[in-house]
Amino acid sequence: MAELLQIEEPSRAKPPPPQWAAFLELGFRPLYLAGCFWAAVSVALWVFAPELLRGKLAGVVWHAHEMLWGFIATIAVGFLLTAGSNWTGTNPLKGRALAALSLLWVLARVGYLVPGDIAFALALACEVLFFAVSALALGRAIYGARSQRNYGLPLLVFALGGADALFLLATRQSDHGQLMQHFNTGLLCMAMIALLVARRVIPFFAIRAVPGLTVPMHTRSGHWQLAAGGLAIGCGLMGWAEASALFLSVAGVVALVQVLAWKPAAVRRVPLLWILYVGYAAIGVGLLVAAAHAAGAVLRAAWPAHVIGVAGFSVLIIGMVTRTALGHLGRPLRPDRLIVCCYGLVIAAAALRLLALLPTGLALGALHASAGAWVLAFVLYLWRFFPMLIRPRIDAPAAPVLKPEQIAARPHPPQ
């Protein structure tokens, strides 16, 4: 009887082995891993070992660049290349082309750490190619499928890469004003991408996850929001600070109104949703902070970047890289305790980082605590998701297992 019970007891299915073909199947796989790995490593270097930053990009300039374009924009490109496949029915990049794109990203990251003009020039060229190739691949899929509602996304990716190139070139001229203008342009381009994409996927995720929940898509207000963001970027480039502040305020208010209309109380028990709501709302608040700064409020220039970047983008990202990865990997959309712990750590890191901006004696301690929570969050993400991202979907058809006589009967290639 004991043997019968042992025989009938179901065993845990063995996961499929890692596969290069699976790893390079969609953009989110290598770029989510690359971006989250760099999120942990770059902050650890910046806070705990800044003496290792010996490249042409040094100090706070390297930190600002790598957080925006090395981490945040990388995750955005990975998401867009994957979502573009769903929106158009055409996979923008896969296989060797995706591997080549990932190699460009790696070379850029290494090049900025190596001293010398040659390393910097190589890194700049690789990074410009990274965004240009991503935008072209995304545009080919979107325009080829005539997906009109997504026509603006390749242009925003181009603008993001263009702002990156201008930022890098400005570092050679030691012009702090130009440097900050290009950084802010990149930050706002990234904000428009995040707001546009999140405004589409968050209601979709919410309706699917909460039975009976209906939330508005806010298509028209989203158009006004995108237009306001574009005008804010244009006015900023022209030096019209007051007009830029006005349009930033419009974009931020629309974002907060959207979050309230999405009925946040209905998703308070769904971690995969409320983390997205928190991140989206923080971007809205960050745009209002940026508006106040542009209007001349007495605020450190670091406030808009950290409210939008850390409290907004990063919280939204940790939600996206878990929710979308689980979905595309065929996993149940139920976060375990470790994933929820990652959410808590990123939120804590954001709160502590903002605390570190205040002129108090707690600033240094808060900065170190923020960095520790941040690094731990993304290390835990990699520990959980790395084994999944290098393997096929769990619902992918398994290769047939041949019997010995079937193998012997197969024709052999000529010698």
Image: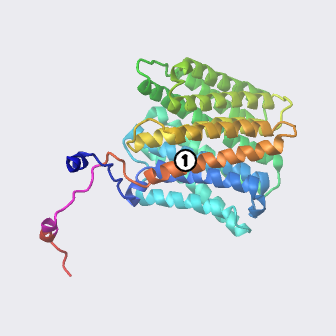
Q: In the rendered view, tell whether residue 78 sits above or below residue 110.
A: above
Magenta part, dominant SS: loop
Tell me if residue 402 is in the magenta stretch.
Answer: yes
Give the x, y percent position of residue 305: 73, 39
Q: Amino acid at mark 1?
A: Tyr
Front residue of 171/207: it is: 207
Residue range (magenta): 397-407
Q: In the rendered view, tell whether residue 411 sits above or below residue 289.
A: below
Give the x, y percent position of residue 253: 66, 22
Front residue of 40/27: it is: 40
Q: In the rendered view, tell whether residue 101 sits above or below residue 200.
A: below
Residue 96 image-quadrant placement: bottom left
The quadrant in which the C terminus is found is bottom left
Q: Is residue 42 left or right of residue 411?
A: right
Q: Is residue 241 left or right of residue 411?
A: right
Q: Residue at x 58, y 32 (%)?
A: 195
The residue to which callout 1 is attached is 381
Asked if residue 222 shows in the view, the reply is: yes
Q: Secondary structure at mark 1?
A: helix
Give the x, y percent position of residue 229: 65, 31
Q: Residue at x 48, y 31 (%)?
A: 201
Q: In the rendered view, tell whether residue 22 sits above or below residue 243.
A: below
